[in-house]
Amino acid sequence: MDYPGRASLGPLDLTVGPREIVAIVGASGAGKSTALRLLAGLEDPAAGTVIRPAEPGRTGFVFQNPTLMPWADARANVALPLELSGVSAVEARRRADDSLAATGLGDRTTARPRQLSGGMAMRVSLARALSVEPDLLLLDEPFAALDSITRRGLIEDLHRLWAARPMAMVFVTHDVEEAAYLAGRVVVLSRADGRAVADIAMPGALPRPEGWRSDPAHREAVEAVAEALARSMELAS
Amino acid sequence: MKRHLIDALPALLLTAVLLAIWEASCRLLHVPVYFLPPPSDVARALVDNGAILAGSALQTFWMALKALIVAALIGGGLAISVSLSRPAERAVAPLAVTLQVTPVVAIAPLVLIWFGLDHADRAVTALAAAIAFFPIFSGVLTGLKSADPDLERLFDLHAASPLQRLWRLRLPSALPFALEGLRVAAGQAVVGAVVAEFVSGSGAAQGLAWRLLEAGNRLRTAELLAALVCLALLGLSLNGATRLIERRLLRDRA
């Protein structure tokens, strides 16, 4: 299977392996979100092709905001993608409950979005993306609005979920440390034309061992990404 | 309950002060009662004509309610069908705007010819519905297009059918806007009912507007004001009812 895909965004040439976590960093306007939408098939490239997994329904997308339906409870929100793809309501709800339990919200299945904190709402959003058992999980700066403790907790959860069930993950962020910690590979986009100016493999195992944030290898990788990002901005100006 | 009372206190006080000034001025300045009767006379007229006024208020209420239902069905239905196709929206938009900028009450004589020659109450309902139509139509249409763009993308991602999108995303998104439109429309429906009755002038409909006209023609100003008070109460209760519905239906949202 030619999975999960090769995206050509003008000059962008990106291949993501089936169990790979790739982070895309770049300045605002570098086309990170566009790259993600191309991967999702939400937009068509002006030129070139995007090769996606065979099953189009098995793509999960996590947006910058939780993007929940305020009129529906957590369970109904998570069940939505399943129901849209024709899974019976009963089955969809059962799988939604499983998905919520996996993201640590097993006891909040009937909560309305307004009753949830920002972190919990994001977990519901994550559970919704995971409910379709995706082969490809796309995340568009999902934790940017959260405090750093909540954000770290969610990243650990992402690693845990990824380890439990293999899937390709593409994570867009502007936070260099987050990118280096989360991903096995960091792609830096240039602000000028959205070209990938660097493609750096991150050291260490996924999920990260305890205390990895202060490990010299990690610090070094963070520096390497930060430098590449700085260079990408110089190119643009 | 106590909290509500405290919130309402300034408005109640102001009303009391205004009524007191009105009463005092009428008495001290010896204003003729046909010109401006004191509030105590109006209160007496309210009590004396209670049964008739209540009957008329009920009549006006039913006509406004019927108009509201007709407007909601036509306005909401049209907004939904228009939202499903971009060309349809482009075709209808100029007409809708024209309708909006035309003072719809001005079509009253026409409505009377069409519906009212034999049944004045039908003309009243038709005009009230015509006036209530626009707020509902534009509220629903705006609401249908107000869905979170990222949620729209999620529906794209999972290849939702147009019907799924309408039913599960756009209609629920439109609800707050539709209810807001309904509240505005409820007030407008009463305006429409009153104007239509004024224009028909036959008394066949026997609503509150007819009471106003009748009392005015006989220079029974206290009765006229009493009918006006009923009309205000009618408007307030319709407004309150729509607010209540709004709060109920939107309770679970942010």
Image (tube, helix red, strand yellow):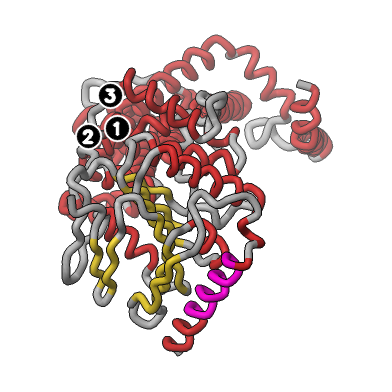
* Residue at the disc numbered 2: B163
Tag 2, which secondary structure? helix
Tag 3, which secondary structure? helix
Q: From the viewer's perspective, tell me whether residue A141 is left or right of residue B31.
A: left
Which residue does the image show at 46% across and 72% down from the upper left? A28
Q: Position of residue B8 (x, y in %)?
A: 75, 31
Tell me which segment is drawn in magenta: A217-229
Residue type pointed to by label 1: Trp
Mark 2 nearby-residue class (10 Å; few <14, some 14–19, many ≥20): few
Do the numbered discs 2 and 3 sit on residues whose CB atoms are within 8 Å? no
Q: From the viewer's perspective, tell me whether residue A26 is left or right of residue B19.
A: left
* Residue at the disc numbered 3: B122
Q: Quadrant of residue B195?
A: top left
B23 or A79, nearer to the observer: A79
Q: Position of residue A96 (x, y in %)?
A: 41, 28
Classified by dominant secondary structure, the portion drawn in magenta counts as: helix
Mark 3 nearby-residue class (10 Å; few <14, some 14–19, many ≥20): many
